[in-house]
Image (cartoon, rainbow, N blue to C red):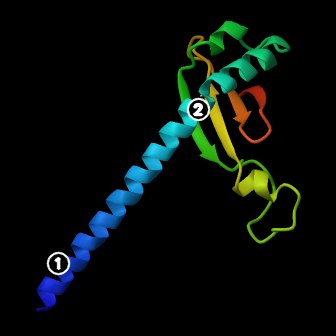
Amino acid sequence: MKAVVFFLVLLASIKIGYHEFMFRTATNEVIVAAYRERAIAACQRDAKGQSLVPATAWAKPKSVKLVIGKQNLDVYLWQVDHTMWSARFKNPYLFLSASDKPSKVFCEFDIVHGAATVFRM
């Protein structure tokens, strides 16, 4: 009897895990598709003021990745009253890499504020 219960719990866990995986994958794809063009336009505007790469390098970015939260902010999880807490842990960002050569030039598009920042790593 224990084996049957264990097997049913295992099947339920697999089903829930697969459902969560599919939901997160679909959500990621939808957000990237919805904001990709806006991010490209914002990166091209920001790149015009800098000489890292030409603005045309953002027309077809090498990769587009969705990230939740900005990792380089000095805010901790327990500092919920901090003004930058949402930016660190909650806000979505799109990271685009330039298609120009194998350069390390990236663009960070803040979906909430609609602003882009081009930088070199």
* Residue under pointer 2: 34
Left or right: residue 14 compared with residue 62: left
Residue 17's disc number = none
Q: Tell me residue 27's x, y (percent).
A: 50, 46
- Residue 105 in sight in this render: no
Crowding at label 1, few (<14), some or many (≥20) Cα neighbours within 10 Å?
A: few
Residue 35 placement, left or right of 43? left
Structural distance between the alpha carbons of marks 2 and 1: 40 Å
Considering depth in this image, is 66 or 38 the residue closer to the camera? 38
User: Under tag 2, what secondary structure?
Assistant: helix
Q: Quadrant of residue 107?
A: top right
Closer to the camera in the image, 99 or 40:
40
The quarter of the image holding the C terminus is: top right
Residue ID at (75%, 47%): 72
Q: Quadrant of residue 89?
A: bottom right
Q: Residue at x 75, y 26 (%)?
A: 119
Q: Name the residue furthest bottom.
A: 1
As drawn, 91 above or below 93? below
N-terminal of the pair, mark 2 or mark 1, is 1
| Amino acid type assigned to the residue bearing label 1 in the image | Phe
On screen, 113 above or below 116?
A: below
Q: Are marks 2 and 1 in contact (CB under 8 Å)?
A: no
- Identity, as a three-letter code, of the amino acid under mark 2: Ala
Q: Secondary structure at mark 1?
A: helix
Q: Is residue 27 visible?
A: yes
> How far from the left and from the top, in percent, is residue 71?
70, 49
Q: In this figure, which residue is indicated by the disc labeled 1?
A: 7
Residue at 62% x, 18% y: name it: 98
Residue 64, above or below 89:
above
Q: Measured from the top left, where is residue 97 in percent x and y?
A: 60, 24
